[in-house]
Amino acid sequence: MSRAINLDVPHADVIAMCEKHNVTISAIEVLPSGGTRVVLMNGYDTALIADAFKSRVIEGVVQRTPLVTRYR
């Protein structure tokens, strides 16, 4: 299982659920279409959070915000 999961849930709610279950977030981002992409530390934690949000898991490909890198 991937450590990343896309959820149709606000950013703050994902953080709160991870805190409730004592799950560490590796990376988190707001999706342009709404919802949140979160990368957790392991597959077990990802399965735990997916189960907590059940029907709010976004299946398939989602549009993400492009990474902006500045060079000097």
Image: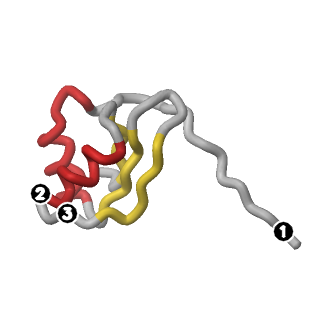
* Label 1: few (<14), some (14–19) or many (≥20) C-alpha neighbours in 10 Å: few
17 or 4: nearer the viewer: 17
* Label 2: few (<14), some (14–19) or many (≥20) C-alpha neighbours in 10 Å: few
Q: Which mark is residue 50?
A: none
Residue on which the image places disc 2: 20
Horizontal relation, residue 29 to residue 69: left or right:
left
Residue drawn at point x = 33 percent, y = 31 percent: 8
Place residue 59 in its image quadrant: top left
Of the residues under marks 3 and 1, which one precedes in the sequence? Answer: 3
What's the amino acid at mark 1?
A: Tyr
41 or 18: nearer the viewer: 18
| Eye-nearest disc, 2 or 3 | 2
Place residue 71 in its image quadrant: bottom right
Q: Which mark is residue 71?
A: 1
Outermost residue toward the right?
72
Q: Are dots 2 and 3 in contact, CB under 8 Å? A: no
User: Residue 53 in the image: x percent, y percent?
Assistant: 18, 37
Of the residues under marks 1 and 2, which one precedes in the sequence? Answer: 2
User: Residue 70 in the image: x percent, y percent?
Assistant: 79, 64
Residue on which the image places disc 3: 23
Residue drawn at point x = 18 percent, y = 58 percent: 44
For label 2, the SS is helix
User: Residue 37 in the image: x percent, y percent?
Assistant: 41, 45
What's the amino acid at mark 2?
A: Lys
In space, the residues marked 1 and 2 are separated at their CA atoms by 39 Å
For label 1, the SS is loop
In space, the residues marked 3 and 1 are separated at their CA atoms by 35 Å
* Label 3: few (<14), some (14–19) or many (≥20) C-alpha neighbours in 10 Å: some
What's the amino acid at mark 3?
A: Val
- Against 11, residue 28 (above or below) is below
Residue drawn at point x = 33 percent, y = 38 percent: 10
